[in-house]
């Protein structure tokens, strides 16, 4: 075997190994079931999107309800260069109540011509969910996440709040809470039922929309 042939063989083997590692990573991010009730995967890298937290519009018609989804969409659209009021976002979602619920978010995003990717809600593994959110942030996509607020006043709900995931590191995820400002929540917090913001819920159902741009 010539040196040139040997070099080609080494390159070929390296490509095979790299593809195997990539497939293993992708499989880990998409595995089914509830093998992990907590977030166990820890990234070696970090990322932080430059998106400031925003609170709810104080002039909303019914101040007894929060405009958390509206605030998340507003922050994400602002990141991609378009400023839209929370009132306009609420109207675009055509909610049956005074605030946007999970099913209204799609209506609002489509109406406002926002491009997005959806987490597969059939996957009930919280570790895979966290992995997917980090993947999107690596791609510079802010992620609207359904969250629980503990102590839990609505245990039958999979999520009762929406917040924007904008960063991560080995310790946890940076979340624009739209209630308490921007916070770094540890992976333990995000998978626990202790008093905090969390992804964990009794139904093992997770909601996320990664905002990828504007159409």
Image: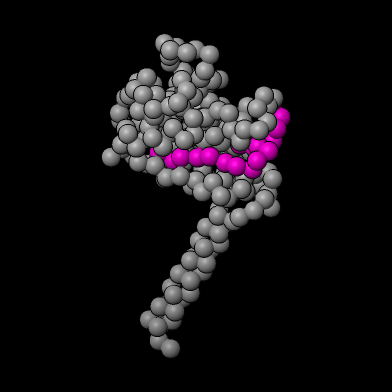
Q: Position of residue 161 (x, y in %)?
A: 55, 28
Q: Main secondary structure of the magenta part?
A: loop
Q: Is residue 209 visible?
A: yes
Return the residue nearer the eye: 94 or 41. 94
Quadrant into which the C terminus falls = top left
Return the residue nearer the eye: 86 or 75. 86
Q: Residue furthest bottom?
A: 1
Return the residue nearer the eye: 187 or 194. 194
Q: Residue at x 55, y 53 (%)?
A: 29
Q: Is residue 194 left or right of residue 95?
A: right
Q: How many marks?
A: 0
Q: What span is colored magenta in the figure?
A: 188-211
Q: Is residue 140 visible?
A: no
Q: Residue at x 52, y 57 (%)?
A: 26
Q: Looking at the image, what colour scheme do you see?
A: one colour
Q: Position of residue 159 (x, y in %)?
A: 59, 33
């Amino acid at each position: 075997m010539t040196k040139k042939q040997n070099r080609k063989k080494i390159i070929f083997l390296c490509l095979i190994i790299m593809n195997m590692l990539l497939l293993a990573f992708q499989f880990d991010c998409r595995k089914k079931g509830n093998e992990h009730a907590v977030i166990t995967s820890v990234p070696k890298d970090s990322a932080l999107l430059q998106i400031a937290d925003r609170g709810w519009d104080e002039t909303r018609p019914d101040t007894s309800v929060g405009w958390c989804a509206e605030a998340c969409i507003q922050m994400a659209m602002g990141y991609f260069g378009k400023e839209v009021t929370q009132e306009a976002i609420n109207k675009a979602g055509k909610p049956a109540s005074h605030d946007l619920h999970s099913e209204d978010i799609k209506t609002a995003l489509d109406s406002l011509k926002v491009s997005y990717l959806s987490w597969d809600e059939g996957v009930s593994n919280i570790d895979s969910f966290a992995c997917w959110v980090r993947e999107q942030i690596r791609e510079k996509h802010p992620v609207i996440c359904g969250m629980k607020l503990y102590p839990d006043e609505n245990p039958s709900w999979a999520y009762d709040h929406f917040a924007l995931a904008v960063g991560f590191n080995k310790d946890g995820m940076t979340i624009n809470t739209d209630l308490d400002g921007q916070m770094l929540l540890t992976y333990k917090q995000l998978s626990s039922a202790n008093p905090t913001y969390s992804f964990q819920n009794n139904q093992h159902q997770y909601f996320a929309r990664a905002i990828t741009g504007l159409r």
